[in-house]
C-alpha cells in the first residue's frame, strides 16, 4: 500500500522505552473518585443521581444533553457523596461540576445487555450503543464518538482509519493496548466500520512500535477488509489531518471535516471501548494511562477508573524521584499543564507525564533570528514567525488572515525554534482571542436584532393603541354631553 | 372682506416661508454624513446610553466630530472599539481601554417586588417576569447596560462580571518584551 508524505513535522526523542516494556498494571481502587460532568467536547452531561445515592458500576450518573455531548457512568459501585465543584484537569485550574463517588470496594456491575451478534446490528443501533456507553475519542480530543458515526449517514465514508500513531513522546498507552488487546481492538475496528458503512479499514501504526504492528497484523489476518499499515515515525503523525494525508493522499480542506472527504478517523483506544460497549454492553468507565517522565520512580501504563486523582496514580508508580518541573496531562508536545495532582483522570487523559528540569528544556527567550526553521516544520504550511510577530503586536485580525485558524497547536515550531520563542503559547493565545472576538461579534449582532425587535414591538403596541383610541373620545363626548 | 384678506395674507405668508425653507434645505441642508452612518452601523444599536449620549446615533455623531473616544461603548467592548477606530482612521490602543469587561445584570431574589419597571427599561428585552412575580434576566440577551439597575425601586439588581468558566477561559498573552 502506498504511503504519502505530509509536509513538515519533526522527530522528537521518543522516550517511550521506560513505559513500553512493562505490561499494563491495574490500579487498586482509589478512596475517592471525582467524575467531571464535562469530559468531552460539547454540552456537559446533566446529573441523574443525588447525594447519598448508592450506584452500581456502569450505572449512568449523568445523561447527555444536546446533539454533541456524552453521558457519564459510575466507574465502580459506591455512594455519591457530593455533586459540586472540583478542580478540572485543565491548565486554568478552574473548577468543573463533578460527581464525587466513594467506592464500596465491591465493584458490583449493573446488569448489562451483551449483543448476541454484534455484527447483525444496524448502523443506527451501533451508534446508539456507542452513545449510551459515553464513548468519546480516547486519543485526547474527547470528541463524542457517536457523533462521528452519525456523520457517516450524511457523508459516504469509504475509508476508516484507526489511529495507532501515538506520535507524542513518552506516551505508550496505545502501544500497550494494541499488544495486549489486539483481538478486541480489531473487533472494535470491524464494528466501527460496520457503523460507518466503510468498506475499507486501515490501522496505521508508527514504525517505532514493531511489537504492536506484529500483534495487530496477527489479529487482523482473518479479516480481508482490514489492513495494518506501517507508517513512518514523524510527529505529528497522530494528528487527524496528517494521518489522513499519509494513508489516503487526500488533504482535508481547511475548516472541513474528514467525513466530507469520505474518511473517518478513530483512535485504537476508542476501538477497544466500542468493542466493549457494542459486544458486552459495558460503558466507558476506565482507560489506560501512561504514567511517565523522568520524575516518576516506576513509570508504566496503568488501567485507571475514570475520576481517579492524578496523585493516586503518581503514588501507585512509586511517587516522584525529584520534584517535577512540570506535570502534564497528555504528551509533552500537545499536553496541557496539570494545575494540581488532585485533578482527576478523565476520558481524554492519555498520560500523566512528570518532567524534570532537564526534560522540560526551560530556557530563556531570545530575539527571533528569522531562520525559517518553524516554516520548514509547520505541518499545515503556515509561517509561524510572521504570525508570531503579528500576534505580539496585537494584530490578531492580520494573524487570522494569515491562517492562524488552521494552526493545529502541534508545537513543532516551538520545538525547533533556536530562539526559544513561546510560539505555541502565542498561537493558543491568538486562537483564544479570535474565538473571543467571534463571540463578541455574535453578541453584538444578537443585540442589534433584539434592539430592533423591541423597537418593532413598541411601534406595533403604539399603533394598536392608536387604533383603539378613536372609540374613546366619542364615549367621552357622550358622557360629557 | 377683512376675513378673506387675512386668510390670503396668511396663506401667502405660509407659501412664501415654506418655499424659502425648501430652498434653504436644498442649499444649506446637512446631508447625513456617511461616516456617521457607518459608525452607527458599527455600534450595537441598543440605545442603552452607557456612553453618556442619549443613543447610538448621537454617540456616532460625537465620534465623528472627535468629541468622544472610540472606547466609549462598554457593551461593544474591544471589537466595537477597533471597528470604530478603523472607520475613523485612528489608531486604537487597547491599553487605554478601561476594560471592566462585559457585565451581566442579576436580579436579587430577595429584593424583587415584581414591579416590572426593569422589564420596560431593558433595551434588549432581556428581562422576563409578570407583575408581582419574581423577574429573571436572560443572560444570553443581557448586554450589561445597567438601565434596569437604575430604575429598580428596591436597588435589587446587581451588575456582575461574567464568571470565567472552562468554556470562556482563554490563554493569556505570553508576557515578554521583544517582538
Image (spheres, coloured by chain):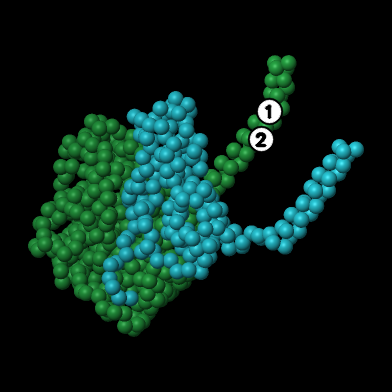
Chain colours: A green, B cyan
Q: Label 2 crowding class (10 Å Cα cut-off): few <14, some 14-19, many 20+?
A: few
**Secondary structure at numbered mark 2:** helix
Q: Is residue B135 left or right of residue A206?
A: right
Residue at coordinates 44% horizontally, 46% vertically from top-left? B145
Q: Between marks 1 and 2, how big is the CA–CA gap?
A: 10 Å
Disc with the residue nearer the chain's start (1 vs 2):
2
**Rendering coords of residue A383 (x, y %):** 40, 76
Residue at coordinates 61% horizontally, 41% vertically from top-left? A456
- Position of residue B132 relative to residue A349, above or below, is above
Residue at coordinates 25% horizontally, 66% vertically from top-left? A332
Q: Are marks 1 and 2 on the same chain?
A: yes
Q: Is residue A289 left or right of residue A451?
A: left
Residue at coordinates 26% horizontally, 38% vertically from top-left? A83
Residue linked to disc 1? A469
Image quarter hosting the C terminus of chain A: top right
Identify the image quadrant of residue B109.
top left
Q: Is residue A254 visible?
A: no
**How many numbered discs?**
2
Q: Is residue A453 left or right of residue B115?
A: right
- Position of residue A410 relative to residue A181, above or below, is below
Identify the image quadrant of residue B99.
bottom left
Q: Residue pushed farthest front?
A: B2
**Rendering coords of residue A201 (x, y %):** 43, 61
Residue linked to disc 2? A463
**Secondary structure at numbered mark 1:** loop
Numbered disc in front, either 1 or 2: 1
**Rendering coords of residue B83 (x, y %):** 49, 62
The chain containing the residue under callout 1 comes to A
- Position of residue B80 relative to residue A306, above or below, is below
Image quarter hosting the N terminus of chain A: bottom left
Amino acid at each position: 500500500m502506498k504511503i504519502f508524505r505530509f509536509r513538515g513535522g519533526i522527530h522528537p526523542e521518543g522516550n517511550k522505552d521506560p513505559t513500553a516494556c512493562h505490561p499494563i498494571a491495574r490500579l487498586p481502587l482509589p478512596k475517592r473518585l471525582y467524575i467531571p460532568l464535562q469530559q468531552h467536547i460539547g454540552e456537559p452531561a446533566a446529573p441523574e443521581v443525588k447525594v447519598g445515592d448508592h450506584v452500581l458500576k456502569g450505572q449512568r450518573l449523568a445523561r447527555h444533553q444536546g446533539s454533541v455531548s456524552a453521558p457519564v457512568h459510575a466507574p465502580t459501585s459506591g455512594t455519591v457523596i457530593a455533586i459540586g465543584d472540583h478542580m478540572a484537569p485543565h491548565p486554568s485550574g478552574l473548577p468543573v461540576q463533578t460527581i464525587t463517588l466513594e467506592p464500596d470496594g465491591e465493584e458490583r456491575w449493573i446488569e448489562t445487555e451483551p449483543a448476541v451478534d454484534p455484527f447483525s446490528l444496524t448502523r443506527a443501533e451501533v451508534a446508539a450503543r456507542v452513545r449510551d456507553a459515553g464513548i468519546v475519542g480516547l486519543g485526547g480530543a474527547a470528541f463524542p464518538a457517536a457523533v462521528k458515526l452519525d456523520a457517516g449517514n450524511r457523508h459516504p465514508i469509504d475509508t476508516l482509519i484507526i489511529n495507532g500513531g501515538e506520535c507524542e513522546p513518552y506516551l505508550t498507552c496505545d502501544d500497550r493496548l494494541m499488544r495486549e488487546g489486539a483481538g478486541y481492538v480489531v473487533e472494535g475496528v470491524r464494528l466501527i466500520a460496520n457503523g460507518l458503512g466503510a468498506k475499507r479499514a486501515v490501522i496505521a501504526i508508527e514504525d517505532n512500535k514493531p511489537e504492536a504492528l506484529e500483534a495487530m497484523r496477527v489479529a487482523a489476518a482473518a479479516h480481508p477488509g482490514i489492513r495494518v499499515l506501517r507508517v513512518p515515525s514523524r510527529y505529528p503523525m497522530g494528528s487527524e489531518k496528517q494521518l489522513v494525508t499519509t494513508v489516503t493522499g487526500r488533504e482535508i480542506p481547511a475548516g472541513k471535516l474528514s467525513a466530507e472527504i469520505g474518511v473517518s478517523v478513530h483512535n485504537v483506544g476508542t476501538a477497544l471501548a466500542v468493542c466493549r460497549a457494542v459486544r458486552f454492553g459495558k460503558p466507558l468507565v476506565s482507560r489506560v494511562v501512561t504514567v511517565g517522565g523522568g520524575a516518576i520512580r516506576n513509570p508504566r501504563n496503568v488501567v485507571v477508573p475514570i475520576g481517579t486523582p492524578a496523585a493516586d496514580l503518581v503514588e501507585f508508580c512509586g511517587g516522584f524521584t525529584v520534584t517535577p518541573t512540570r506535570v502534564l496531562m497528555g504528551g509533552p508536545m500537545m499536553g496541557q499543564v496539570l494545575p494540581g495532582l488532585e485533578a482527576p483522570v478523565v476520558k481524554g487523559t492519555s498520560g500523566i507525564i512528570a518532567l524534570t528540569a532537564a526534560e522540560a528544556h526551560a530556557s530563556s527567550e531570545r530575539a527571533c533570528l528569522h531562520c525559517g526553521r518553524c516554516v520548514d516544520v509547520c505541518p499545515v504550511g503556515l509561517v509561524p514567525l510572521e504570525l508570531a510577530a503579528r500576534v505580539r503586536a496585537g494584530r490578531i485580525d492580520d494573524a487570522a488572515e494569515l491562517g492562524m485558524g488552521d494552526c493545529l497547536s502541534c508545537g513543532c515550531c516551538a520545538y525547533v525554534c533556536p530562539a526559544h520563542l513561546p510560539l505555541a503559547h502565542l498561537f493558543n493565545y491568538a486562537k483564544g482571542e479570535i474565538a473571543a472576538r467571534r463571540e463578541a461579534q455574535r453578541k453584538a449582532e444578537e443585540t442589534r436584532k433584539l434592539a430592533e425587535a423591541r423597537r418593532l414591538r413598541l411601534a406595533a403596541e403604539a399603533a394598536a393603541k392608536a387604533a383603539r383610541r378613536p372609540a374613546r373620545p366619542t364615549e367621552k363626548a357622550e358622557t360629557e354631553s | 372682506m377683512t376675513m378673506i384678506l387675512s386668510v390670503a395674507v396668511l396663506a401667502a405668508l405660509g407659501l412664501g416661508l415654506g418655499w424659502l425653507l425648501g430652498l434653504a434645505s436644498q442649499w444649506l441642508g446637512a446631508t447625513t454624513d456617511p461616516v456617521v452612518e457607518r459608525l452607527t452601523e458599527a455600534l450595537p444599536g441598543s440605545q442603552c446610553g452607557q456612553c453618556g449620549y442619549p443613543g447610538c446615533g448621537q454617540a456616532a455623531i460625537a465620534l465623528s466630530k472627535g468629541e468622544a473616544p472610540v472606547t466609549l461603548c462598554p457593551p461593544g467592548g474591544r471589537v466595537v472599539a477597533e471597528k470604530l477606530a478603523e472607520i475613523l482612521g485612528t489608531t486604537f490602543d487597547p491599553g487605554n481601554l478601561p476594560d471592566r469587561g462585559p457585565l451581566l445584570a442579576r436580579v436579587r431574589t430577595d429584593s424583587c417586588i415584581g414591579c416590572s419597571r426593569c422589564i420596560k427599561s431593558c433595551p434588549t428585552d432581556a428581562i422576563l417576569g409578570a407583575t408581582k412575580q419574581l423577574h429573571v434576566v436572560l443572560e444570553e440577551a443581557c448586554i450589561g447596560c445597567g438601565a434596569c439597575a437604575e430604575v429598580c425601586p428596591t436597588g435589587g439588581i446587581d451588575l456582575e462580571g461574567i464568571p470565567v468558566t472552562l468554556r470562556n477561559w482563554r490563554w493569556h498573552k505570553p508576557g515578554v518584551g521583544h517582538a
